[in-house]
Image: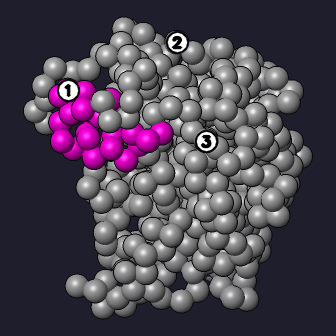
Amino acid sequence: MATTERPTTNHLKNMKSQSNHSRLSLLSAIFTAPALLWLAAGSAHAEKLAVEKDSLKLGFIKLTDCAPLVIAKEKGFFEDEGLQVEVIAQSNWKVLLDNVITGNLDGAHMLSGQPIAATIGIGTEAHIVTPYTLDLNGNAITVSNSIWEQMQQNEPDLDSDTPPHPISAAALKPIAEDLLADGEKLQMGMVFPVSTHNYEIRYWLAASGIHPGFYSKTDVAGRTDAEVELSVTPPPQMPATLEAGTISGYCVGEPWNQQAVTKGIGVPVVTNYEIWKNSPEKVFGVTRKWADENPNTIIAVTKALIRSGKWLDETDAAGKLVNREEACRILSQPNYVGADFEVIKNSMTGTFVFQKTDVLDMPDFNVFFKHDCSYPWYSDGVWFLTQMRRWGQITEAKPASWYAETVKKIYLPEVYRKAAASLISEGYMTEDELPKTDDSYKVTTADFIDGNAYDGHKPIEYINSFEIGIKDDAALSGE
């Protein structure tokens, strides 16, 4: 994209003292026309927004990816927007969602699937929307020591201090088959039926030919035809449940995989970065009613979260994350994640410990801003809808147009654009940090563990591309 002289931070900060009209005139001299489309949308918000509600209660679950909410509070980004925010831990994802719906919470750190599922009536029904994706990646699948030993026996390459990555579920398949032959099923945990973790562990298993089971109107547990039995366990309880032998593995966010390594009770075998590179993880969610009643407040919250994500991803000239250790110390406080600093630090500072002998550099294990992370992409929402259909949570076939129409009811890129435009005019963002998109769909990617390509514009073709999963009539694609 051709540009004239790039604006400096000082240029932008000096604009605060000018009127909206004169500020936009100056911007027109230094920004290209596409950027002005963003800036014009937010120019009226360059000064502090007149928020409709200035005292907020926001919920979270004790996972490291609650960091944008926590940091926005602790570093004063909410306060800069005229917001007094209380950040409150919730016991599980259902309680968190219920509290948002009833108004006990104004908004919350949510699973990416929660606004989608609630809006289309899977489980608790309510219209939930999101203007902001909190992070990418951040999850892993851990198995017990005994299962890991059996996997090593089945695949000799794994019997190493530094086995090759990524590790597929191929070495797990004989274990599952042996249990089935004995009338039993391998028990594994995930955090919630509409969680990224559920879809990631299902994707990983199915990619190696292990059927994780279908949902139906009569099977809300999703165990029809299952060769591995998946059950719900709250994230902080995962290590203890594994240690007790109730489950033999789980998919969860950090720090609960690293906790298994520290306690010596399990081995993480694959991260969700390896299952789907730069996969969307959590979002910030509010009810549609709350968003409609508080249009300036939701922009203000989004501004604070964008600044928080940038702070979390800030690096020095050598590419080292400069604020992550401070973030880990904040998150280790008992009122936030409450895990040991060293455990949180393992993954948050750019490495991931699979075993004490197997430590890999993973600078993108937790992403909070770069790679256009925080933008609410329609294509992300479509992916979750395809997985809900693939496994039967969406019980009836839908045309491709339904997928596009549904995500547009839930994802709010227009709110993000207004927040970003305001931050640009205030000097906290630059034009090149804005996603380059015409339709809020990401480009086609094959960055999955099985190499299967995903195009958000073609949901029916994608659903039908899997060997294991529900198939829909190709005519529903509309082509």
Tag 1: residue type?
Answer: Ile
> Residue at left 39%, top 30%?
19
Q: Which residues are magenta?
A: 23-45
Q: Can the viewer see residue 260 in this picture?
A: no
Secondary structure beneath disc 1? helix
The residue where tag 2 is placed is 322
Residue 30's label in the rendered image is 1
Q: Earlier in the sequence, mark 2 or mark 3?
A: 3
Name the residue at the left extreme.
Answer: 2
Q: Nearer the viewer, mark 2 or mark 3?
A: 3
Q: Is residue 341 above or below residue 168?
A: above
For the residues marked 2 and 3, what is the alpha-carbon distance in whole angstroms?
33 Å
The residue where tag 3 is placed is 50
Q: Position of residue 269 (x, y in %)?
A: 58, 41
Residue 11 vs residue 172, the one in the foreground? 11
Assess disc 2: are there few (<14), some (14-19) or many (≥20) residues with their C-alpha within 10 Å of its C-alpha. Answer: some
